[in-house]
Amino acid sequence: HEGSHPPSLAIMTKKRRNGGRNKCGRGHTAIVRCSNCGRCVPKDKAIKRFQVRNICEAGMQRDMRDASVYETYTLPKLYMKLHYCVSCAIHSRVVRVRSREARKVREPPPRFRGGAKPQQQQKAK
């Protein structure tokens, strides 16, 4: 019919090469619940982080160390695997929004021990 357009061979642009998921050839993946808001998120799309904490706070640790018979006993850590939906991960700054060029960078950012951030080097003009 006259008003129809010819089939276009243009390919739609993709924001991410994996579509924001790690599914590859699988058709369906299990769901997990977001640790922050409870939203159902596909397991491969969820942002996963381990939170490592002491089982008890510092004051209680000191009391237990004083009362303990063993000199060199270290208390075990508490490892919690947290799953975030994309909205909560961005809102709580677990991940950041990156520019189009920066999205292609696949290596993880440098890690810093103790939460100390590096000093920003000032450019000399």
Image (spheres, helix red, strand yellow):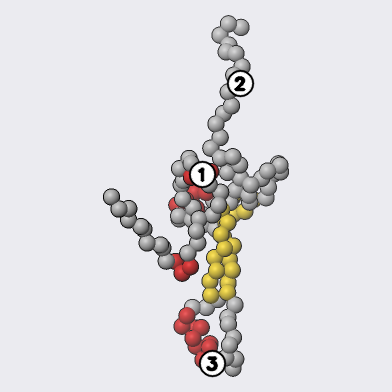
Residue count near mark 1 (Cα–Cα under 10 Å), binned few <14, some 14–19, many ≥20: few
Residue linked to disc 3: 67
Q: Amino acid at mark 1?
A: Arg
> Residue 15, how many percent across, how many down?
53, 37
Q: Residue at x 45, y 55 (%)?
A: 93
Q: Amino acid at mark 3?
A: Ala
Q: Amino acid at mark 2?
A: Leu
What is the residue that sits farthest to the left in this orientation? 125
Rendered image: mark on residue 9: 2
80 or 38, nearer to the observer: 80
Which is in the foreground here, disc 1 or disc 3? 1
Which is in the foreground here, disc 3 or disc 2? 2
Q: Earlier in the sequence, mark 1 or mark 3?
A: 3
103 or 56, nearer to the observer: 103
> Residue 20, how many percent across, how many down?
58, 43
Q: Hey, which quadrant is residue 74 in on the image?
A: bottom right
